[in-house]
Amino acid sequence: MTKNIAILSTVVNFDLYQKSAPLFPKGIQKYLIDGRNGMHAMDSVCYMFKKLKDQNIDWLIMADEDVLFINPDLVFPIIQRMEQEQYTVCGVRDGGVIPHRVQNPFAINTFFSIINFKEISQIWNEDEVLKHQFIVKDEFKDDLSQVPGDYSKESLFEPYYCFYFWLRRQHKKILFLDASVPFEDDAITNLVFDDQGNKMLYHTWYARSYGSNDKHTKRINAIFDKALKTENTEIAPIIFKDPTYAFKKNCAKQYAKVVVKLKSMLKK
């Protein structure tokens, strides 16, 4: 099995990251995209492929700062299975598994995933990927009979769905993981299991609110207090930040507004 494994987080709350990152799997390089300038979702995925393409990474774990690992070493046998059975992605469906996520069951939610970065990098084409934000009825043949919750097969709720739809249309396999709501006094936090049903991590959600919203700060701290012990990590993260991202995003929005206005004037 390959040893070139890394973990990447797109972080908007560095205070929370400082508490959760020491719980990440040990002995692998950490990478961090500074998302405080608004970079997230599909923009973060595209930036990730630009910044990591020359880092000799075979497998990439993607975990938000509000992911709190319980048994971080479980990621390694998952990667071994993915390698042996030719899975390209693993994660939790964004519909039907987590009670408050009722969107598309054919894609995963990016709060936690593992991807075959080397394989995807060899076929990566940003312009082509972005064209796949669409649904064809009955295109994906997943057996959803055991999916317990609500979902929408037609949902395009998240802009990053195009990434997973593109991979599926390239005949790449996704290993879907199960999740549950573990605490009676917390209907938001999810417990995610590995492919063998072992408890692997908590996802608390609402990372942006940590430290500024009393309700969510206390709720997330309670997860740390109940279940986790932090340790010092031996490998510091490598941080990436696009200093022009916010400016370019704003220019794109203003340009789009001008185009819409011009089209409206031409119609009159």
Image (tube, rainbow, N blue to C red):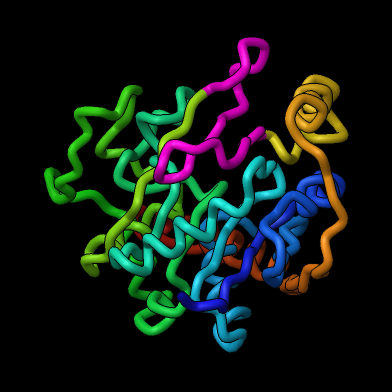
Quarter location, residue 153: top left
Residue 21 vs 239, above or below: the answer is above
Q: Residue furthest top?
A: 184
Q: Nearer the viewer, residue 32 or 165?
A: 32
The residue under the point 83% across, 67% down is 234
Drawn side of residue 39 relative to residue 266, left or right: right
Question: Against 152, is 129 above or below?
Answer: below
Residue 65 coordinates in the image, percent (x, y): 71, 48
Q: Residue at x 43, y 37 (%)?
A: 197
User: Relative to the observer, which residue lies in front, 210 or 40?
Assistant: 210
Query: Residue 136, how many percent across, how many down?
Result: 17, 50
- Please give the name of the residue rendered at 62% of the width and 70% of the height, measured from the top-left corner: 6
Residue 38 in view: no
- Residue 191 placement (x, y as % from top left): 56, 31
Say left or right for 210 vs 153.
Answer: right
Magenta region: which residues?
181-205
Horizontal side, residue 9 vs residue 131: left or right: right
